[in-house]
Image (tube, helix red, strand yellow):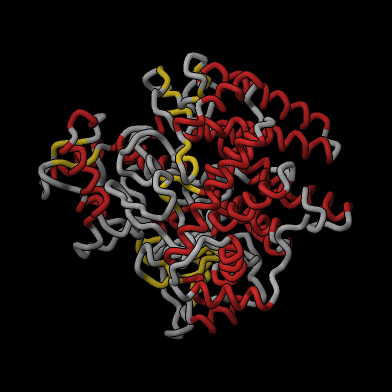
């Protein structure tokens, strides 16, 4: 049965009407499918789409940056004229993530990608790393093979020219990645017969993709990404100390300080006593214990920082070429003060790592994720095990016997480390490991089901995980945790990617009824919410089975769009109608 053919013109017209009218009514999967069909177009961006340049996170219009090692694209000057945008070339070739600091740029901007891509929606107006995997799954399910392949090719382009799959294609993300799904994206396209009708073309494409996937994987085995001597990995941002560059102001950080002051027993050493307006001696001390208050105020104070070169800059609107200009420095650190306190340097490292994890924000690794870099997470290491097994399979297909043996050994070593450090036999769950403190976490988190999707769990471990579904399962699907921290990646909230990975993992281990039940619960939540207000959201309330999401800690918006929710909805519907259709 083909559940998801291309929609007819009648269905598309219905989608357009429904998407612009918040009409309450009965939950109807057909309306949800129509909404998604229309949304693919509204969420698609490309370099010649001027709307792709807008960046509401910084409240400014972007410049467009080209890689230093890319021949100038043929249409780039036409795009520059059409969109009235500066097209500049990054100052250096980037071999690895973090080789180039975006603080060297005078202005942050959009990073060039060669193919159209689907964005999440709302203020997420760029191509995101792990979102793209779930979007690609949906595109393949909806028979949009060219767009799906183009997005995977964009991810490979990022590896080739920016050092790794990025958090997203903005210059301020050049220091961190996101959960590593690149090999799974490659597999999603390769496994779809419609993507490559000619098997020789598929093999040729894989031959080009494989070394780039290997290069992306190597990001996670560098010293900075190692979780001590556990043999496991951690999340880590190569951007250095202090607040992330894309943070527009210090409101979020002041909220963290205020929360910690209201919950002193939860402070893990994140608070540092400090003046709001420190003198020179205190500024020097804060540079080590907190962040660079002096550096962050230098631009606002009118001092011109050290010059840096940006090659090939053109300003079409003004008809001039800007000269070498100053380093961009954040002013956020200076404002991150409340009631006599600032945040510690270690908190900022954790905050950056938390953003790479994609779970921004949960209290699973300390309040507001402030100790994320201290943990070997279940999710990341499950993804890397899957990455290693995928690379093994790709090497076999390409006849690379020595490579295949190396990947099999790497996967076996990670499997052993996962069992040693992350499996809790007394709990019957996989749980994160604090390698700094040398002890496992006691925080129940839905990523405990990632090992099922990755294929790393034994049959006995899978049975134990299934027995604990009650910790997470509510009427609307699987909630993130059983901790009501007030943050968006905790109870009672649930998200499309984690519901899909858990359902797909359960289905892969033969728990088809459980997988279908979760699929019905989560798709029903989406259907009810869309019937209520005409939108699809980034997250939902699993306790109430709708989009009634009220966040008390951290980021409070529930963004409309929404790319990965659309993709997962299609995959869950496919699972419901074709239970053994693949993952």
Tell whether 481 sits left or right of 18.
left
Front residue of 216/456: it is 456
Image x and y of residue 310, in percent: 47, 65
x 48%, y 26%: residue: 227
x 36%, y 61%: residue: 307
Is residue 172 visible from the viewing direction of this image?
yes
Tell whether 548 sits left or right of 400.
left
Pick out the residue farthest to the top: 426
Is residue 90 visible from the viewing direction of this image?
no
| Quadrant of the drawing holding the N terminus | bottom right
581 up-or-down from 556: above or below: above
x 63%, y 55%: residue: 570
Image x and y of residue 61, in percent: 41, 72
Tell whether 581 sits left or right of 540.
right
x 62%, y 42%: residue: 516
367 up-or-down from 253: above or below: above
Front residue of 196/1: it is 1
């Amino acid at each position: 049965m083909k559940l998801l053919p291309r929609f007819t013109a009648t269905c598309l017209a219905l989608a357009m009407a429904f998407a612009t009218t918040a009409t309450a009514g009965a939950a109807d999967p057909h309306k949800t499918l129509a909404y998604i069909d229309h949304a693919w177009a509204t969420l698609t961006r490309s370099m010649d789409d001027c709307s792709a340049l807008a960046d509401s996170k910084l409240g400014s219009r972007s410049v467009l940056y080209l890689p230093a090692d890319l021949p100038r694209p043929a249409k780039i000057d036409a795009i520059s004229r059409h969109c009235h945008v500066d097209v500049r070339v990054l100052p250096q070739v980037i071999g690895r993530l973090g080789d180039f600091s975006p603080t060297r740029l005078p202005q942050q901007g959009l990073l060039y990608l060669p193919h159209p891509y689907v964005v999440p929606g709302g203020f997420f107006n760029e191509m995101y790393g792990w979102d793209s995997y779930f979007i690609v799954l949906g595109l393949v399910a909806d028979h949009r093979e060219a767009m799906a392949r183009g997005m995977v090719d964009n991810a490979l382009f990022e590896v080739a020219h920016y050092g790794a799959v990025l958090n997203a294609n903005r210059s301020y993300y050049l220091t961190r990645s996101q959960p590593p799904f690149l090999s799974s994206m490659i597999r999603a396209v390769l496994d779809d017969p419609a993507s490559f009708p000619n098997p020789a073309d598929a093999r040729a494409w894989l031959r080009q993709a494989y070394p780039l996937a290997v290069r992306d994987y190597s990001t996670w085995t560098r010293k900075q990404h190692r979780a001590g001597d556990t043999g496991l990995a951690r999340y880590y941002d190569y951007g250095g100390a202090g607040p992330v560059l894309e943070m527009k102001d210090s409101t979020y950080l002041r909220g963290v300080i205020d929360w910690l002051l209201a919950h002193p027993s939860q402070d893990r050493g994140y608070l540092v006593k400090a003046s709001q307006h420190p003198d020179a001696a205190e500024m020097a001390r804060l540079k080590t214990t907190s962040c660079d208050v002096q550096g962050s105020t230098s631009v606002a104070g009118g001092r011109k920082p050290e010059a840096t070169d940006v090659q090939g800059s053109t300003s079409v609107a003004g008809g001039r070429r800007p000269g070498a200009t100053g380093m961009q420095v954040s002013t956020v650190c200076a404002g991150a003060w409340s009631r006599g306190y600032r945040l510690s340097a270690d908190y900022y490292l954790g905050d950056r790592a938390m953003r790479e994890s994609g779970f921004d924000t949960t209290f699973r690794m300390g309040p507001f994720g402030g100790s994320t870099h201290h943990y070997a997470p279940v999710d990341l290491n499950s993804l890397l095990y899957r990455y290693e097994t995928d690379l093994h399979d790709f090497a076999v297909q390409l006849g690379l016997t020595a490579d295949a043996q190396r990947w099999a050994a790497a996967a076996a070593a990670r499997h052993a480390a996962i069992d040693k450090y992350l499996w809790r036999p007394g709990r019957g769950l996989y749980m994160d490991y604090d390698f700094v403190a040398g002890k496992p976490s006691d925080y129940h988190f839905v990523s405990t089901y990632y090992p099922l999707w990755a294929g790393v769990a034994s049959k006995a471990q899978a049975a134990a995980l299934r027995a604990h579904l009650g910790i997470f399962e509510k009427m609307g699907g699987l909630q993130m945790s059983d901790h009501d921290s007030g943050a968006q990646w905790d109870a009672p909230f649930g998200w499309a990617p984690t519901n899909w990975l858990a359902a797909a993992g359960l289905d892969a281990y033969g728990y088809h009824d459980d997988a279908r039940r979760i699929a019905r619960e989560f798709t029903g939540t989406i259907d009810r919410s869309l019937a209520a207000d005409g939108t699809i959201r980034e997250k939902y309330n699993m306790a109430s089975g709708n989009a009634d999401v009220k966040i008390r800690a951290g980021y409070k918006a529930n963004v409309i769009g929404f790319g990965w929710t659309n993709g997962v909805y299609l995959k869950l519907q496919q699972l419901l109608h074709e239970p053994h259709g693949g993952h």
